[in-house]
Image (cartoon, grey):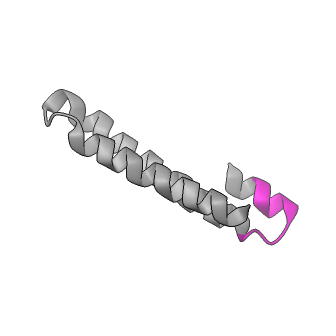
């Protein structure tokens, strides 16, 4: 189950990156594309960090 979530969050980040690569390069879209790349890659990083929590309160803190 845990490995499945790690793989899913990784796949999500890669899929978002591929989508952003296809978005037309223009001034209007650059801010959205940059934000989507940052936020989609942080999903996996945040999940992995939450799995290394030392206590329940640390787990909750990492999810914030």
Identify the residue at image location x=85%, y=67%.
Answer: 55
Residue toward you, 8 or 53: 8
Residue toward you, 50 or 21: 21
Q: How many circles with numbers are drawn on the protein?
A: 0
Q: Is residue 27 magenta?
A: no
Check the image and name the residue furthest to the right. Answer: 56
Judge from the rendering whether residue 59 lies leftward or rightward of residue 6; answer left or right.
right
Relative to 48, is 17 above or below? above
Quadrant containing the N terminus in the rendered view: bottom right
Judge from the rendering whether residue 26 lies leftward or rightward of residue 32; answer left or right.
left
Identify the residue at image location x=14%, y=37%.
Answer: 25
Q: Is residue 58 magenta?
A: yes
Check the image and name the residue furthest to the top. Answer: 28
Residue 20 percent coordinates (x, y): 28, 42
Residue 19 in which image quadrant: top left
Residue 2 percent coordinates (x, y): 71, 64
Identify the residue at image location x=48%, y=54%.
Answer: 11
Q: Which residues are magenta?
A: 52-60
Residue toward you, 22 or 61: 22
Residue 42 percent coordinates (x, y): 50, 54
Judge from the rendering whether residue 6 lies leftward or rightward of residue 30; answer left or right.
right
Residue 7 percent coordinates (x, y): 56, 61
Identify the residue at image location x=59%, y=58%.
Answer: 46
Judge from the rendering whether residue 22 lies leftward or rightward of residue 36; answer left or right.
left
């Amino acid at each position: 189950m845990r490995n499945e979530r790690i793989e899913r969050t990784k796949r999500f980040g890669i899929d978002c990156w591929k989508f952003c690569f296809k978005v037309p390069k223009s001034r209007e879209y650059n801010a959205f594309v940059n934000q989507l790349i940052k936020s989609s890659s942080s999903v996996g990083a945040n999940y992995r960090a939450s799995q290394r929590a030392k206590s329940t309160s640390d787990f909750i803190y990492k999810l914030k």
